[in-house]
Image (cartoon, helix red, strand yellow):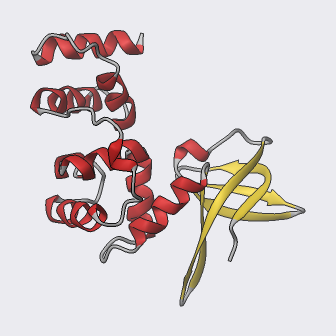
Amino acid sequence: MIASIEGRITAVFQDWLTISVQGIGYKVYAPPSAFGKVGEETLLHTSLIVREDSLTLFGFVTSADRDLFELLLTISGVGPKVALSILTTLNADNLRNAVVADRPEILTRVPGIGKKTAQKILFELKDKLPKGLDAAPITAFDDVNSDVIDTLVALGYSIIEAQTAVQAMPSDAPPNVEERVRLALQYFA
């Protein structure tokens, strides 16, 4: 119904923002990557969720993110809030890597997703991901890297920041957790 929205950001909240279009303010739920500053012009690709008691608009920076959101909604038990939480916690590449490598522990880092739900999402997405995406290289998230990510998240970094720092490590990085955490912290400096 509503494929996109373009207007001025008039308010930013924790998980939604208000976009003013010709004097009408639209409440749009979005991942933080879609948030700009109040007063900025923005264009978001949207998905309108129609329920018996509400019309809810979800916005994304790219149409690919919107399509992935809508793909997540096809999985039984995954509603719009959980799908948005997945895309807020993991970027599209990290989600794809989790699916291709069959790593449910990556999805269990998303608030509200347990092990069974993570396994179900991975199973359902294996056949639904667009063809060709699994040809991209996969960053190995072995136990050491998972421990590094968990440590960085405990230190207050987002999971996306932690995963980016781990992916930026040189291939000859030391195999122990402490040294890898130190390298990751240097990445942030």
Provide residue 178's location: percent of width, then percent of height.
14, 14
Residue at x 63% of width, y 63% of height: 46
Left or right side of 7 for 183: left
At x 52% / y 54%, what residue is drawn?
65
Residue plotted at (88% across, 63% down): 23
Nearer to us in this view, 34 or 37: 34
Q: Nearer the viewer, residue 173 or 83?
A: 173
* 137 w.r.t. 179: above or below: below
Q: What x and y, as percent, mark residue 164?
A: 37, 28
- Quadrant of image for the C terminus: top left
Residue 133: percent from left, percent from top: 39, 49
Residue 74: quarter of image: bottom left
Q: Position of residue 123 (x, y in %)?
A: 21, 65
Q: Residue furthest bottom?
A: 52
**Identity of the residue drawn at 22% across and 16% down:** 181
151 horizontally vs 18: left or right: left
| Most foreground residue, 128 or 95 | 128
Please tell me whether residue 170 is drawn above or below residue 39 in the rendered image: above
Q: Is residue 50 left or right of residue 122?
A: right
Judging depth in this view, the residue of 129 and 44 nearest the camera is: 129
141 versus 29 height, above or below: above
Numbered disc total: 0
Q: Quadrant of the N terminus?
A: bottom right
Q: Quadrant of residue 57?
A: bottom right
